[in-house]
Amino acid sequence: MSLKRKYGLLASSAAVALLLAACGGDTGSEDTGTDNGGDSAEVENGDTGSDIPEFDAVVENEGDPIDGGTLRIAMVADSAFPGIFSTEFYGINLDSQLMGPMLGDLLRQNDEYQWSDGAASMEYDEEENKVTITLQDGVKWHDGEDVTVDDIVFTHEIVGHPDYDGVRYSEALQSIEGMPEYHDGEADSISGLNVVDDHTLEIQYTEPQGPAILQAGGGVWAYAAPRHYYGDLPIEDIESSEQVREKPIGFGPYKVANIVPGESVEYEAFEDYFEGAPKIDKIIVERVPTSGVVEALKSGEFDVTWGMPSNLYDSFDEGIPGYTTLGTPGQSYDYLSFKVGKWDGKKNVYDPDSKMADKSLRQAMAYALDIDAVGAEFYNGLRYRATSHIVPNFGDFFDSDLEGYPHDLDKANELLDEAGYEDVDGDGIREDPNGDPLTINYAARANSDAAEPIALYFLQAWKEIGLDVQLLEGRLHETNSFYDRVQADDPEIDVHEGGWGVGSDPTPDGLYGETAAFNFPRFVSDENNAYMDDMLSQKGFDTDWRLDVFHEWQEYFMDEAVSIPTFWRTELQLVNDRVSNWSHDEVPGADPATYGWHSIELLADEPLTD
């Protein structure tokens, strides 16, 4: 008789990992190269020639906590947040952050980015190819109704519904028994979701799952949606509904009290939170433009910052009185993406005749950019040249031997010459291999004070190698409309910049797989599909074998150059001295009993400024 192998997950993290779209994939590693225990954060970033400053990762200020109080958070952003308070429909990181205090953690992540206990626990039975989710007693929605496993079923029904037009219908969800039939309208329910009782859900998969099933944001869709609250809303109406945009509910420690669309959210303590009532009465998050955040902090208007721009660091590198600067290597990178295909509604379709289909052209554009100099000049060394699509935080999964695309004009010109991009008429600008004029349209976001000078530098660098690259419509674009156009495959966009938050699973199928809606290059190849299949296969439980696959894919995908990672980031937060028990948002595995939203304390009535 063979013994069933079961994988249990232990609790230890304070935040649900969400697949962050447009700033958005959601890993395990034996050594992340990061000390996130509290004193500092360091990262081995490959040979980029950058000196990365070190920062604290948590704040534990000492003193007598006040009773209640209001925590004020500055969301540093130059664009309004969309305000989609739904894991099924949200699009960018701003909304993900805003859901943090109110959403609730069905499962959390540990310090190896694997699922751990939250409001529920999870167990994977490899032999039976089944996941069991067990919900604990006493978990309530903010309107007082009990959270049940039927709410977990409901979130699967939303994402899998034929009328769902979001981006989270993943390959992992498609491997649930009965999900494809439900998605195609051939069944009214998902046969692989077995509700044992109000607290136990079994999820049956049609084929063996690989190690990604254990990763936070990997195989299991670990969220819940309040079926009773959405009522009989048609699936296509949920995203725009009052329940999502104006009066969202979760089962987290704070409930939403008021929303000023695009500008601010006020939360109040949820006394029936399953891990105990919060220690603070209210939280107010207010959007603050980058140009005003430093002065606002000096005036003591806020306790914490979300998204502190690294290009502002030289204005507070010696510290702001009353604040501690926290920093950790981010689960994110910036990139250039070259459009080589289209999205047909279900999968990406590669177009070998597209303007940017020539690999030599893409590689040349990468070599033309001095990313090291840009990081030093505009980001104070807090963004540094990326060499892979796998971030260094993923430890051994990251291939530290990759060189990436260092600045090399000779190499760039050589690639273009050999590929037939020649200056036929002697005007200093190359024509395409057929001798026809070549103009490349570049799209960039208006997301910081550094955005315009960096975009202009990119255009000048590409002109230096003889390429006519024009800024789309002669200007930068507001972030939300920018991503709308990118995702819709706007034919005017040939190449664009952007940023991804990679979440908690190193497997890149959610960003670069054939059926990934976030595969913005729209690149597909048999070789890339094979790599994705191998990464997700059961053979991946052999860690050494899986690491080899990851390293081979990184080399392959960097060479294809349909997406060029440009910067890795050190993510900064400033925290006032009156705040205690605060962990940087990007520290994995922080103990929720110490650093959870319900555990944060205030030590004074107002922010301290000296």
Image: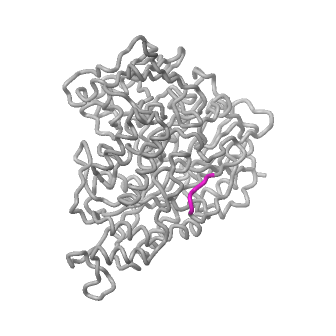
Please say whether residue 307 is one of the residues in the magenta stretch.
no
**Whether residue 255 can be seen here:** yes
Q: Would residue 514 be found to the left or right of residue 599 on screen? A: left
Where residue 103 appears, as percent x and y from the top left, is 50, 31
From what the image shows, is residue 496 above or below residue 578? below
Closer to the camera, 326 or 83? Answer: 326
Where residue 310 appears, as percent x and y from the top left, is 59, 59
Closer to the camera, 350 or 593? Answer: 350
Magenta segment, prevailing SS (helix, strand or loop): loop
Where residue 515 appears, as percent x and y from the top left, is 29, 43
Q: Quadrant of residue 1?
A: top left
- What range is drawn magenta here? 43-47
Q: Would residue 495 be found to the left or right of residue 215 on screen? A: left
Tell me the residue at 34%/31% (across/down).
173
Closer to the camera, 121 or 236? Answer: 121
Q: Quadrant of residue 14?
A: top right
Tell me the residue at 35%/79% (across/down).
466
Where residue 228 appears, as percent x and y from the top left, is 38, 20
Tell me the residue at 49%/71% (across/down).
407
Q: Residue furthest bottom?
A: 426
From what the image shows, is residue 494 above or below residue 247? below
Closer to the camera, 600 or 114? Answer: 114
Mark count:
0
Q: Would residue 238 be found to the left or right of residue 307 on screen? A: left
Q: Residue furthest front?
A: 1
Q: Residue furthest right?
A: 63
Please say whether residue 46 is one of the residues in the magenta stretch.
yes
From what the image shows, is residue 363 above or below residue 480? below
**Whether residue 86 can be seen here:** no
